[in-house]
Amino acid sequence: MGLFTVTVLGFAVCIGISGYAIIHYFAKGMNTHDAIQVDPKPSK
């Protein structure tokens, strides 16, 4: 039972680290602060 628990927890940690890396990569690529420079807000 201990081996199963360690395996499941290790797998969950690996998935969590991979998910964090993917989210961090996409969040860095989709910077919303420079969106106005690329597509300026239309004036009325």
Image: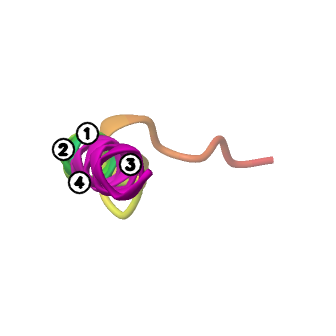
Alpha carbon distance from label 3 to label 4: 9 Å
Task: Identify residue for label 3.
Answer: 12
Sequence-earlier tag: 3 or 4: 3
Q: Label 3 sits on what residue type?
A: Ala
Q: Few, some or many C-alpha atoms within 10 Å of disc 4 (few <14, some 14-19, many ≥20)?
A: few
Alpha carbon distance from label 2 to label 4: 12 Å
Select label 2 or label 1 by which is in front: 1
Q: Secondary structure at mark 1?
A: helix
29 in relation to 20, above or below = above
Inspect the magenta stretch and tell me whether residue 33 lies in it. no
Sequence-earlier tag: 2 or 3: 3
Alpha carbon distance from label 2 to label 3: 20 Å
Q: Secondary structure at mark 2?
A: helix
Task: Identify residue for label 4.
Answer: 17
Q: Is residue 44 left or right of residue 43?
A: right
Q: Position of residue 2 (x, y in %)?
A: 36, 58
Q: Label 4 sits on what residue type?
A: Ile
Alpha carbon distance from label 2 to label 1: 5 Å
Marks 4 and 1 in Cβ contact (< 8 Å): no
Residue occupying the point 21% across, 52% down:
28
Colour pattern: rainbow
Sequence-earlier tag: 2 or 4: 4
Q: Label 1 sits on what residue type?
A: Ile
Residue 25 shows which numbered tag? 2
Q: Secondary structure at mark 4?
A: helix
Task: Identify residue for label 1.
Answer: 22
Q: Few, some or many C-alpha atoms within 10 Å of disc 3 (few <14, some 14-19, many ≥20)?
A: few
Magenta region = 1-17
Alpha carbon distance from label 4 to label 1: 9 Å
Front-most of 7 and 1?
1
Sequence-earlier tag: 3 or 1: 3
Residue at the farthest front position: 1
